[in-house]
Amino acid sequence: MKLIKCIVRPNKVDEVKDALSRLSVSGMTVSEVRGHGKQKGHTAIYRGKEYNVSLLPKMEIEVVVPDLLVPDCIKAVIEAARTGEIGDGRVFVMPVEQSYKIRTGERDID
């Protein structure tokens, strides 16, 4: 199993969710996060005063999928989240050793 962690634009969450649903990925965690990469933020004006916004709002989507489904999930996320502009986000893939259901205590195989 692998944990796929995606950092995407807030307006792309529904598209990514739909793309993963088409692959029968049922469970996911979505969190509001803030950060920056090459985009580095921007300047804004609030009540006539200019200030720098260095940490931009993003959304983090986490899914755990079987190893065989990883390439398709990555492709689906990239296609759904891409705008072609700086700040589209990142996809990280990490191994998952074990998973347990809290209610029953049973170990998930996949």
Image (cartoon, rainbow, N blue to C red):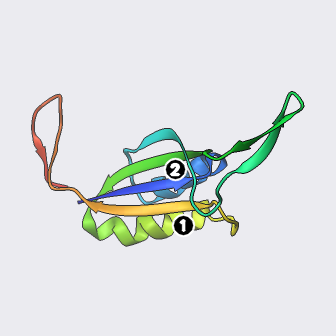
Q: Label 1's element?
A: helix
Crowd rating for badge 2 (residues with CA inside 10 Å; few <14, some 14–19, many 20+): some
**Which of pointers 1 and 2 lies earlier in the amino acid sequence?**
2
> Mark 1 highlights which residue?
78
Query: Where residue 28 sits in the image (x, y, percent)?
Result: 40, 45
> Mark 2 highlights which residue?
17
Query: Where residue 65 sits in the image (x, y, percent)?
Result: 30, 57
Query: Where residue 91 sits in the image (x, y, percent)?
Result: 45, 62
Looking at the image, is 36 positioned above or below residue 53? below
Most foreground residue, 59 or 52: 52
Q: Label 2's element?
A: helix
| Image disc number at residue 15 | none
Query: Where residue 61 sits in the image (x, y, percent)?
Result: 46, 48
Tell me which corner region of the image, top left, top right, bottom left or bottom right, holds residue 74.
bottom left
* For residue 99, side relative to residue 7 (left or right): left
Tag 1–tag 2 contact (CB < 8 Å):
no
Q: Quadrant of the C terminus?
A: bottom left
Q: Nearer the viewer, mark 1 or mark 2?
A: 1
User: What residue is shown at x 66% (from left), y 47% (from top)?
Assistant: 11
